[in-house]
Image (tube, grey):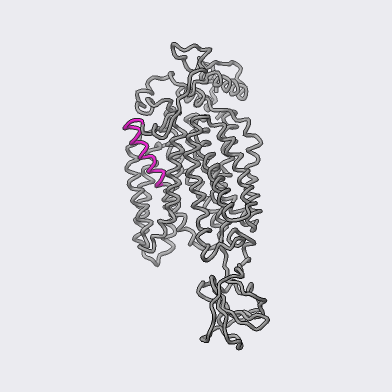
Amino acid sequence: MTRFQAFVYFTSAFQAISCGIHYLASVFIAVTPKYICRPPGNVSLVLLHNKTFSQINEVWHLLTSAEDPLVVQEKNGDIWELHRCNRFKREESLPPTYLYDGNKTLFSCSDGYQYDHTHLESSIVTDWDLVCDQEWLAKMTQPTFMLGVLIGAVAFGDIADRVGRRPIMWITSSCQFIFGVAVAFTFNYYSFVIVRFLLAMASSGYLVVAFVYVTEYIGSKARTWASMHIHAFFAVGVMVVAFVGYMMRTWWIYQIILSLITLPFILCCWMLPETPFWLHSQGRYKEVERVIATMEKWNKVSTPCKLSELCPVEEGIDPERRDAQPAKNHSVLDLFHNCTLARRTISVWLIWFTGSFGYYVFALNSVNLGGNEYLNLFLSGAVEIPSYIVCCLGMDKLGRRNTLAPFLLLSTVICIVIMVIPKDYSTITIVMSMAGKFSIGIAFGLIYLYTAELYPTIIRSLAVGSGSMMCRIGSVVAPFCVYLTEVWIFMPQLLVGIMALVSGLLTLMLPETLGKPLMSTMEDATNKEKKEESTGKSLFEANGVMMEKVESSNADICNDSPMHRF
């Protein structure tokens, strides 16, 4: 990787930390602590079973069941039974006892709720009383965020193919900072959801376009590790959420601190150029030459070269008027341009859905492990890093398809094993669940790069964006799948296993892309092998060789041909 490539890559990948932060921030923003219906007056005595206390705050560590009421006596002598979502006033003001069979009157929680602030200063739940009949609003914060992620993925992916990668990266990164800070100053639940929805669109849009951006700048040798390490930056964002959540227990201060992570990128993102791949696909050849000149300056290349040395000029086109060629706009329908692309798109979409669906099903089941929730979240981010290393090694040695398919099929096997483990062997179940998350996580990370390599430049962002849309549909469906445990305890594993099996078999029908140059046109995508024989006729092929030669740092080879100078 050259100096210029390293700058472009690490600058772009750094912002992926913010994407990981905003995706998981709601874990501590919308947390619901223990709570009870607030009594109308000042409390002088609290009873829980056979124990007596002077304040409600002294009882939280013993209040383990939602069915157990608190009996409180106010300073004026009134006795109340406090439940989570209602309260009863006893008619007789006798010496208070926990059990009572006399007359009592039902009241609503018109005075609000009292929350356990032992481990949490505030959340949107405590600030806006999102409990009882308003509990569904708190549960909808993450689904509405993921809906924004879904829309942002396909929308910005399409726009990036039309107007370029760089403008979208500028806009989405700026919006992440603006909307991220704005979330902390929302004044009610509905404004919070709206701003978070816009934040989700920006975060998703950046992540999709950043994958395409670094893929088009990195040579085929380093493309595997470079693209997968963006997932590692995302995982770092998850660990940052856990650390900041542990240090700061007030949700709006916590949100501001997390949003400030975006600021360094905004200060230097203006230096990032447009990719020569996209410029060339739009016929903007003079701008390609300017980018090449910038690369030469960064890499201290003494002998300059021109675009014509990298890619022959098409006959019949005036070199001075090449920029005047109109660019064709593309839509999702171009992903179904012919039968070959249609089959490929259906398979890729199903893999995206399965990866996200399985990942979140295993993740939701892991919350029952107990222990420190901050440490658990930190480890859940940390465990992703070795999975990406294994994924990279497999992709480089075995290929994209030959790594993806076995791990999808392995996920099916793990789901079957979980279903036959006796209920008493909880430790084995946890180990196998983590193995399932590890396995499906490899597929979840690999599909980004594989999708980018399966499609030509003119629809590459659109393909990744639409795939990410299917991914977000999977993440929205996953919680509802977990609810099916009420029907059958192993229903989630059954559904994940079936989806992973079908996806794994379809993956075997996809072409291998390991070490292959990026495609330029629709014809490249449908006639990949034939196009690869026509070397030197595509800027992408020339740059694929060019990037590989630079990475080897072989000065002699660099002097043999001008297309190897970068």
User: Image quadrant for the N terminus?
Assistant: top right
Would residue 220 be seen by someone viewing this image from the given angle?
Answer: yes
Residue at 65% of width from left, 80% of height from top?
Answer: 74
Locate residue 433, reporting x and y percent. Answer: 43, 56
Residue at 53% of width from left, 50% of height from top?
Answer: 381
Question: How would you classify the magenta stretch by its main secondary structure?
Answer: helix
Residue at 42% of width from left, 48% of height from top?
Answer: 474
> In the image as oriented, which residue stretches furthest toward the bottom?
94
Q: Assess whether residue 32 is covered by the magenta stretch.
A: no
Q: Is residue 415 left or right of residue 313?
A: left
Q: Between 510 and 565, which is closer to the camera in this rendering?
A: 510
Vertical relation: 262 (above or below) 137: above
Quadrant hosting residue 298: top right
Vertical relation: 12 (above or below) 354: above
Q: Between 189 and 492, which is closer to the camera in this rendering?
A: 189
Locate residue 133, reporting x and y percent. Answer: 51, 65
Vertical relation: 242 (above or below) 424: above
Q: Which residues are magenta?
A: 337-354
Locate residue 486, reporting x and y percent. Answer: 38, 64
User: Image quadrant for the C terminus?
Assistant: top right
Vertical relation: 558 (above or below) 340: above
Quadrant hosting residue 249: bottom right
Q: Assess whether residue 350 is covered by the magenta stretch.
A: yes
